[in-house]
Amino acid sequence: MVNHFIYRFLTIEHIKESPQNRSMSPEKQSRDSYGESEERLLESKLQRKKAEEDAKLLANRIALLRLEEQKALKKVEETRKKAKEILKLKQRNAEAQRLKDEVFHIVIANA
């Protein structure tokens, strides 16, 4: 469809530039102007449609990135939780080992 309009546009440009067109009646020139207006209108509609499609694609991409961000934040929070649990476990094990060592030293000292 666009090719038809490009051909039509080129044909109109050719007619405008031709020597015969210089003596063209105002009515004929008005029809050519109408064709140009029609083409500009079509072109602006196509540009608007393309812009709307681009906006929709960008909105979808932003939504996807937000979902990915939420997933990443959730994983970070889970990792922090696990790190805290590991530290507590290490502290508990260290305390248990300290108590064992204390008991061992008391037993040896009493023996």
Image (tube, rainbow, N blue to C red):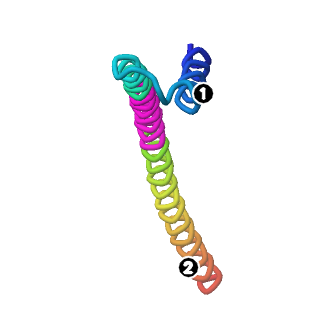
Q: Secondary structure at mark 2?
A: helix
- Horizontal and vertical percent for residue 38? 39, 21
Circle 1/circle 2 CB separation < 8 Å: no
Question: Label 2 neighbourhood size at 10 Å, few (<14), some (14-19), many (20+)?
Answer: few
Q: Nearer the viewer, residue 53 or 98?
A: 53
Magenta-span inclusion, residue 61: yes
Question: Label 1 neighbourhood size at 10 Å, few (<14), some (14-19), many (20+)?
Answer: few
Q: Residue at x 49, y 42 (%)?
A: 68
The image quarter containing residue 81 is bottom left
Q: Residue at x 46, y 34 (%)?
A: 54
- Horizontal and vertical percent for residue 96? 54, 67
Magenta-span inclusion, residue 4: no
The image quarter containing residue 8 is top right
Which residue is disc 1 drawn over? 14
* Residue range (magenta): 43-66
User: Looking at numbered disc 1 in the image, what kind of residue is underneath it?
Assistant: His
- Horizontal and vertical percent for residue 70? 42, 44
Q: Nearer the viewer, residue 56 or 84?
A: 56
| Image quarter in which the C terminus is found | bottom right
Q: Residue at x 54, y 60 (%)?
A: 86
Q: Earlier in the sequence, mark 1 or mark 2?
A: 1
Q: Secondary structure at mark 1?
A: helix
Disc number at residue 102?
2
The residue mark sitting in front, 1 or 2, is 1
Please say if 91 is above or below 44: below
